[in-house]
Amino acid sequence: MTRLIFSARGYKRLKPLIELAQAEGWQVERTTGSHLKLSKPGLPPIYTGSTCRDHRATRNALARLRRGSRSGEERDNNG
């Protein structure tokens, strides 16, 4: 299966988030409203803004990404 790599061009502050998400197997897409959608099968999608207006947005998305990865691992181990 071919995985499309989302370019981090224009997303300087979000580049670490995008790279981590792709390394963890998340698919990164841009929504029609220019937000980022992080999705992984079996887990709910994570949406985050793509602008630097909210200085906490990147950190909050990283935390949700880590929590989502952990909960996915727990589901795999339990069932």
Image (cartoon, rainbow, N blue to C red):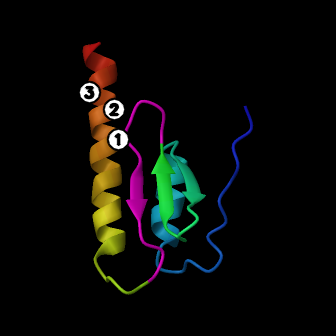
> Quick one: quadrant of the C terminus?
top left
Q: Is residue 60 magenta?
A: no
Q: Secondary structure at mark 3?
A: helix
Residue name at image x 51 percent, y 45 percent? 26
Q: Amino acid at mark 1?
A: Ser
Q: Position of residue 78 (x, y in %)?
A: 25, 16
Mark number, residue 74: 3
Q: Amino acid at mark 2?
A: Gly
Question: Closest to the observer: 35 or 73?
Answer: 35
Task: Give the extent of the magenta segment.
Answer: 40-51
67 in relation to 10, above or below: above
Q: Secondary structure at mark 1?
A: helix
Dominant secondary structure of the magenta stretch?
loop
Could you tell me how far apart the alpha carbons at marks 2 and 1 are, in whole angstroms?
A: 5 Å
Verify CB contact (< 8 Å) between mark 3 and mark 2.
Answer: yes
First-in-chain label (3 vs 1)? 1
